[in-house]
Image: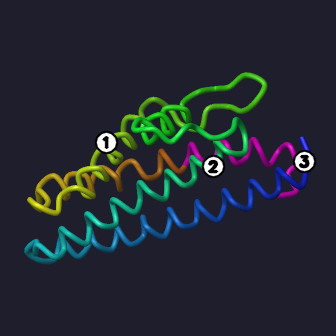
Amino acid sequence: MEEGKIALFLADFDHQLSQIEKIYDLLDSRSNALARKKVAPESVESIGYWLHNLFCAYEDLFKIVSAFWENNIGNDGAFHRALIRRMVLTIEGVRPALLSEKSFRHLDELRGFRHVFRHAYSYGLDDERVIYLLKKVLKEKKSVLGELNTLRKKVASLLGGRV
């Protein structure tokens, strides 16, 4: 595989990963604020917005991986789930799996929330559900990011560790 293309993939991957980490930092600060005061509807809405953005950022990363390694997935109604499902697959001779089944289930739950968030304009968000998901997302952060970094290291090794 051409080194320039791998280096470009890694640059795109790293940039998107930094966006994901910024969202986690923001969610962490929102979580700390919740512990200090009564939960206001605006806080729940803000957290919901950033949970939505977190999934979107992951999805953008998965699109980068999919486009580079095995071409894009179609854009039908099942696109969002098919994209993260593909990240669990080891594609022999192409790439290792990016996510474990556990991380897939976690991110699929976040995907489901994103769908609800986008369509909650007529009924609002469930405060308890948003706070539960926030805690779960922060708990699973290290595990999911660790899996992403494992793939990154494997790809970087193709360049002899120069990136």
- CA distance for labels 2 and 1: 21 Å
Task: Measure the alpha-carbon separation of dots 3 and 1.
Answer: 37 Å
For mark 1, does the 10 Å Cα neighbourhood hold few (<14), some (14 to 19), or many (20 or more) residues?
some
Q: What element carries label 3?
A: loop
Any mark on residue 60, and which?
Answer: none
Q: Is the magenta stretch mostly helix, strand or loop?
A: helix
Label 1 element class:
helix
Name the image quarter holding the N terminus.
Answer: top right
Residue sitting nearer the eye, 83 or 130: 83
In which quadrant of the rendered view does residue 101 lie? Answer: top left
Inspect the image, locate mark 1, and give the three-letter code of the amino acid beneath it. Glu
Total marks shown come to 3
Q: Which of marks 3 and 1 is in front?
A: 1
Which residue is painted at 59% across and 48% down in the image? Answer: 63
The amino acid sitting under disc 3 is Gly
Q: On the image, numbered disc 3 is attached to which residue?
A: 160
Which mark is nearer the camera, 2 or 1? 1
Q: What percent of the width, then of the height, locates residue 122?
A: 11, 61
The residue at the far top in this view is 92
Instruction: Please state the horizontal and vertical placement of residue 4, each as a whole percent of the image.
Output: 89, 55
Asked if the residues shown at circle 2 and circle 1 are in contact, with their CB atoms under 8 angstroms apart, the answer is: no
What is the CA distance from the residue labelled 2 to the residue labelled 3?
A: 16 Å
Residue position marked by numbered label 1 in the rendering? 109
Q: Which kind of residue does numbered mark 2 sit on? A: Asn
Crowd rating for badge 3 (residues with CA inside 10 Å; few <14, some 14–19, many 20+): few
Q: Residues within 10 Å of mark 2 (few under 14, many from 20)?
A: some
Number of the label disc, if any, that sits on residue 149: 2
Label 2 vs 3, first from the N-terminus:
2
Residue projecting furthest to the front:
76
Residue located at (20% from left, 69% from top): 45
Q: Confirm or deny contact between disc 3 and disc 1 (CB under 8 A).
A: no
Ranked by sequence position, the earlier of labels 2 and 1 is 1
